[in-house]
Amino acid sequence: MEPLFALWMTLAGLGTVIGALGIYVWRSPGDRLLDGGLGFAAGVMLAALSFGLLNPALEQGALIEVITGLVLGVALMLGLDRLVPHLHPPRGPEDGTPDARRRGWLVFGALSLHNIPEGMAVGVAFAVGGTELGLPLAIAIMAHNVPEGFSVAIPFLASRMPRRRIFAVAASSGLIEIPAAFAAFAIVGVASGLLPLSLAFAAGAMLYVCVDELIPAGVRGGSERVVTLSCMLGFILMLVLNQLIAG
């Protein structure tokens, strides 16, 4: 494995660290800021799974393999939602110390589990296409993790937990992506015949996160236009980045 691959697979999981720093800047962030961040992350991830995962999957495998991988990826995320105590990221700090802390840990657990297939996606992309496929996807995941890290921190703000500890918890929510990425890289390197299925599987998991988590969380407060425009901006920026790297 090239050192550059390892560096970006690590950085992708550290996007939550940037997001967690938000608790030192915005004590009570506005809904539009949060909604815009979620919409932007959704656009980035939609572009990444389309150009970075599905395109090479279709180039290297049959359509049935790609469809199967997509279905399996969505099924995994659906299963996690049903089996794991799950809460969508809240819109702002809530009153009530015990409830706020409990809600925070539930959000932390749910989003941490969702980060496993995202880390796998980055590892698969680098294993299949090196920097050309892996770098745009790693940047996309890192961008997605920024608002996610802030979302994990929000419910703890009303729990009287020390701000340094809130930062540590929120920042660590994306760390599980790093071993997931390295494991996926190793597995795909050994079983090259699973490449199309693996790419589509990762795309299906990311698609579920966008449709079930990011976009609904953004429009819940009535900021549909902000979410839509931010999503388009994220998608366009990833399209340009993908073309620059490919060129």
Image: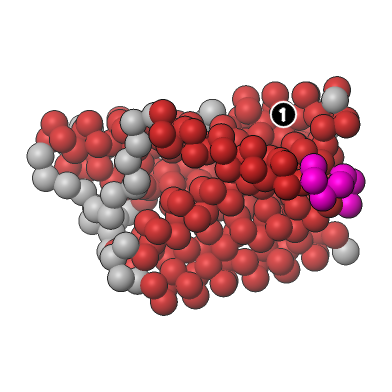
Element assignment for label 1: helix
The correct choice, above or below, for 101 with respect to 235 in the image is above
The percent coordinates of residue 194 (x first, y second) are 82, 32
Task: Quickly name the residue at label 1.
Answer: 184
Q: Quadrant of the N terminus?
A: top right
Q: In the figure, 215 relative to 138: above or below?
A: below
Tell me where residue 20 appears, x and y as whole percent: 39, 43
Q: Nearer the viewer, residue 4 or 56?
A: 56
Does residue 56 belong to the magenta stretch?
Answer: no
The type of residue carrying mark 1 is Ala
Q: Residue at x 71, y 66 (%)?
A: 239
Q: Is residue 223 above or below residue 177?
A: below
- In x, y percent, where is residue 232? 57, 72
Colour mode of the rendering? secondary structure
Q: How many marks?
A: 1
Specify start and end residues of the magenta stretch as a single range: 59-65
Quadrant of the rendered image containing residue 37: bottom left
* Magenta region, main secondary structure: helix
246 or 87: nearer the eye?
A: 87
Residue 130 position in % (x across, y down): 84, 42
Dot 1 crowding, Cα within 10 Å, few <14, some 14–19, many 20+? many
The residue located at (41%, 77%) in the rendering is: 225
Viewer can see residue 231: yes
Residue found at x 52% / y 54%: 210
The image quadrant where one finds the C terminus is bottom right
